[in-house]
Amino acid sequence: MGSTQNKRRTASNLSRSVCALAIVAALAGCANVSNIKTGSVPVGNKPIAQMNSSELSRAEGKYASAYKSNPKDKAIGLNYATLLRMTGRNDQALAVMQQVVINHPTDRDVLASYGKAQASAGQLEKALSTIQRAQTPDQPDWKLLSAEGAVLDQLGRSKEARQFYRKALDIVPDEPSVVSNLGMSYLLSGDLPTSETYLKRAVALPGADSRVRQNLALVVGLQGRFGEAEQIASAELSRQQAQANVAYLRSMLQQQNAWSKLSDKKS
């Protein structure tokens, strides 16, 4: 029993380190539930969630100009803040959302995005309060339920988080982003096999995007199946990006002597 607990603790610590370092670019912050639209700003035909770093940078530049011209526009503000978060500029994303929420103080979409920006900037308790304020118990929004779960996961309250994911799935049973968040919740607590089960289910659902597949690649790689992880990652990333991500993950496992612990035989 002790050996199994140690392996789960090692997996949990390593998983949290992976999230903090953003090893897999498409992970977008771990358990991210953002589903953004391009609004009125043309950024090309590819969905934003599937853009590479250079495409995200170009899109961000276009939204920066649009936001400067019209900072009160809800869609522009939401998308600009999301792009900033996706490119790691969390403090700036929070500043943008603080302005958006001033102009749309009761809008549920705005409050949800504001909560995500707070969470990305490390203001987890404030994020939880903002998301709860946006929710209406008589007509619960599944996106807000999932967002609340994601914040609770980051606070280390995984059992509570999973209750919110399951409430969201009662509303939208086949929503891949929620199933993926549930899988990532188990990853964060070190239960890699259960995490993989949910992530494989999420990948198979209609509408699963690149981030869901990269989450699966991550959990497969954390179990030492690097070739399989690279194959999954290569479905959307370039071969070079997939190889670089897997090489980094392999290096981290070796440096922490984590793989040898994870692969020990059960006692």
Image: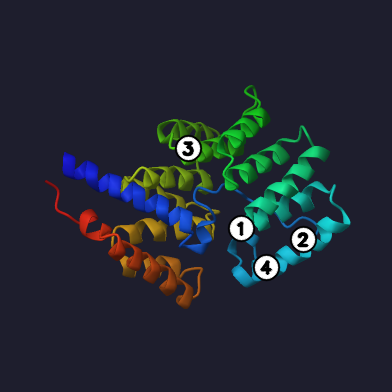
Amino acid of disc 1: Met
**Crowding near the residue tagged with mark 1, few <14, some 14–19, many ≥20 C-alpha atoms within 10 Å:** many
As measured in the structure, the alpha-carbon distance from the residue carrying label 3 to the one carrying label 2 is 31 Å
Residue designated by label 4 = 57
**Crowding near the residue tagged with mark 2, few <14, some 14–19, many ≥20 C-alpha atoms within 10 Å:** many
Nearest the camera: 106 or 45?
106
Name which of mark 3 and mark 2 comes first in the sequence. 2
Residue drawn at 37 percent across, 64 percent down? 249
Name which of mark 4 and mark 2 comes first in the sequence. 4
Query: What is the residue that sits farthest to the left in this orientation?
Result: 267
User: Residue 199, image x and y in percent?
Assistant: 41, 51
Left or right of 156: which side holds 26?
Answer: right
As measured in the structure, the alpha-carbon distance from the residue carrying label 1 to the one carrying label 4 is 10 Å
User: Residue 167, image x and y in percent?
Assistant: 51, 31
As measured in the structure, the alpha-carbon distance from the residue carrying label 1 to the one carrying label 3 is 21 Å
- Mark 2 in CB contact with mark 1 (< 8 angstroms): no
1 vs 3, front mark: 3
**Crowding near the residue tagged with mark 3, few <14, some 14–19, many ≥20 C-alpha atoms within 10 Å:** some
Amino acid of disc 3: Leu
Q: Which dot marks residue 86?
A: 1
Name which of mark 1 and mark 4 comes first in the sequence. 4
Residue designated by label 3 = 155
Q: For residue 148, which quarter of the picture?
A: top right
The answer to whether residue 228 shows anywhere in this view is no
Residue drawn at 66 percent across, 51 percent down? 91
Left or right of 161: which side holds 194?
Answer: left
